Amino acid sequence: MAGSFLIILREGLEAALIVGIILAYLTKTGNRGKSGVVWMGVGLSVLMSVLVGAAIFLTAGGLEGRSEALFEGVAMFTAAGVLTYMIFWMRKQAINIRVHLQQQLSTALESGSLTALALLAFVAVGREGIETALFMFAATKTATPAAATLGGLLGLVGAVALGYLLYRGTYRLNLRSFFNVTSVLLLLFAAGLLAHGIDEFHEAGVVPPVVDEVWNTNRILDERSTVGSFARALFGYNGNPSLVEALAYVTYLLLVGWMYFRPPTAKELTPGRASA
């Protein structure tokens, strides 16, 4: 529940910010009447995301045994990779995303093409939606489907509410702090997905565990208990990991954590290099 809540809150707020920037620019430039086209693009992107999510779940549901373990392992690895990319992309783009979007909007408006305007909204929001569909599939494998769904719905409500308040200017949220805090939590979540993917590969016989059980802390905190399930869903807690799982989890956090928190280079700080 916690993992899906965090994912949907973060992804939903990013999508809400994008839509808010587009609508605010249209209002500012006297093109508010074209906002319906933007909402059409958003609606189509949501529909596409739902269809992609349904395809993922249906594909997984039709597999059994080794094939299912392989599919879920690949899905976990993919989700961890996309999540990591998304975290770094948002850190780099957070400052320039408004300017870049406005440049694209200006081009679309100058061309007079409503299709270009709808496509801009469709692509910008659709990326978040497809990522969310993949992450939700991964989240249901670290928590019960009911808990993951409830967490996702709560996260969606929170994202829509925050996005609306930010758009109306009635709530001042420090976005840099918000994204930094959620990025740390998502890095832990991604590390857990990576380790869980390795566990699936253990079951499929693709990756040997080397040592089946490095330690066992289930007597202290059972991963099946309420608190243990929460820690497993959000942080990837495993009471009895294999050696490969433990090494992957720690290595990911040390390497990616260092890359995220290291001081940016002069090249990265140079304006105008960002691209959405």
Image (cartoon, rainbow, N blue to C red):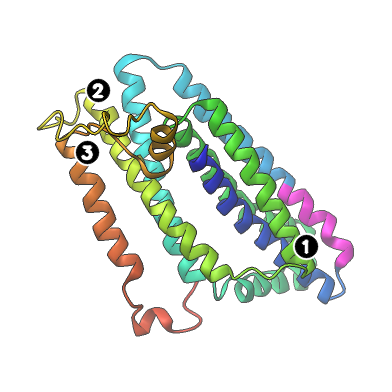
Ranked by sequence position, the earlier of labels 2 and 1 is 1
Q: Secondary structure at mark 3?
A: helix
The residue labelled by disc 3 is 245
Image spot of residue 163 (x, y percent) = 70, 59
Mark 2: give few (<14), some (14-19) or many (20+) Cα within 10 Å: some
Q: Give the CA separation, mark 2 to mark 1.
A: 51 Å
Q: From the viewer's perspective, is the residue at label 1 or at label 3 nearer?
A: 3
The residue sitting at 34% across, 69% down in the picture is: 261
Residue 161, can we see it? yes
161 left or right of 244 in image: right
101 left or right of 131 in image: right
Mark 3: give few (<14), some (14-19) or many (20+) Cα within 10 Å: many
Q: Between residue 228 and residue 16, name the one nearer to us.
A: 228
Q: Quadrant of residue 259?
A: bottom left
The residue sitting at 89% across, 63% down in the picture is: 33
Q: Secondary structure at mark 2?
A: helix
